[in-house]
Amino acid sequence: MSARTRALAVCTALVLALLVTAVLAPLPYSLAYPGMTANVLGADDGKPVITITGAQTRKTSGQLRMTSIVATGPEADVRLPDLVKGWFRTDEAVMPREAVYPVGENTEEIAEHNAQQMRESQDTATSAALGQLGRSGKGIKVKLSLADVGGPSAGLMFALGIVDKLDGDGAGHDLTGGRKIAGTGTITAGGKVGAVGGVPLKTQAAKRDGATVFLVPRKECADARAELPKGMRLIPVSTLDGAVDALKALRTGDTVPSC
């Protein structure tokens, strides 16, 4: 064997070794999928998702569905073949692990962080809803119960659910107009809607569970349009007031914002 042939063989072996290492090495990504949805106007595990005391509530129709994604755990090994497969699927997304799990090093820490964010989201959703209705909240207590859901992304839908149960559209009608409406977005106590991530997967979860309208944070319109399920209508929102107005317009057939 000549020196040139030996050198070529060594180089080929090194390249193959690097390729094998690249294929087998864990990468700092998570794989995400469409998660569960829940009607915040309904019940979860036999209990009302929204319970209001200290104020008269109204019977509602239609649905307001919060949406979610599920992802591989922080300790799961995600390798190059997994990423390649995820890039070519519409029901799967490759996301930086730090974007999915920004806090915590293990499942327990992350679960506690998400639970805390959910509790804070419920408080701000209540404040936003009562503020939108011009109520002080004195004497009104709102309890939100939704098992196995963490994080702040259900804030908008919680707030809309509270508004619908207390006041509807303000004229005796439901905000939903009898439709199945889904959505996502964080909420501040002042009613501002924030971006959340994973919107394309959430629109798929909404479609799977029968929704025909999806409320999306305005800044995520482009992401939502990218892989929008057929027959799903997008409504961009940036405030709770805007979301309420859009749903009123949808019910009456007036002009509704679009992405």
Image (cartoon, helix red, strand yellow):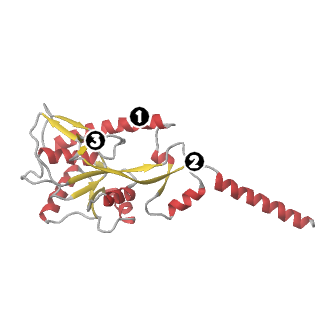
Q: Is residue 94 left or right of residue 25?
A: left
Which amino acid, mark 2?
Asp
The CA span between labels 1 and 3 is: 21 Å
The CA span between labels 1 and 2 is: 22 Å
What percent of the width, then of the height, locates residue 203? 34, 59
Which amino acid, mark 3?
Asp
What percent of the width, then of the height, locates residue 118? 33, 39
- Name the secondary structure under disc 3: loop
Which amino acid, mark 1?
Glu
Farthest bottom residue in view: 230
Q: Which residue is mark 2?
A: 77
**Sooner in the amino-acid sequence: mark 1 or mark 2:** 2
Towards the viewer: 187 or 169: 169
Q: Which mark is residue 45?
A: 3
Local packing at callout 2 (Cα closer than 10 Å; few below 14, some 14-19, many 20+) is some
Front: mark 2 or 3:
3
What percent of the width, then of the height, locates residue 238? 27, 53
Question: Which residue is drawn at the image coordinates 69% and 58% (left, top)?
Answer: 19
Q: In which quadrant of the rendered view does residue 4 lie?
A: bottom right
The CA span between labels 2 and 3 is: 33 Å
Question: Which residue is drawn at the image coordinates 29% and 54% (left, top)?
Answer: 183
- Name the secondary structure under disc 2: loop
Q: Which mark is residue 112?
A: 1
Q: How many marks?
A: 3
What percent of the width, then of the height, locates residue 35? 38, 52
Local packing at callout 1 (Cα closer than 10 Å; few below 14, some 14-19, many 20+) is some
Q: In which quadrant of the rendered view does residue 162 lie?
A: top left
Which quarter of the figure is the C terminus placed in?
A: bottom left
Farthest front residue in view: 46
Towards the viewer: 154 or 217: 154
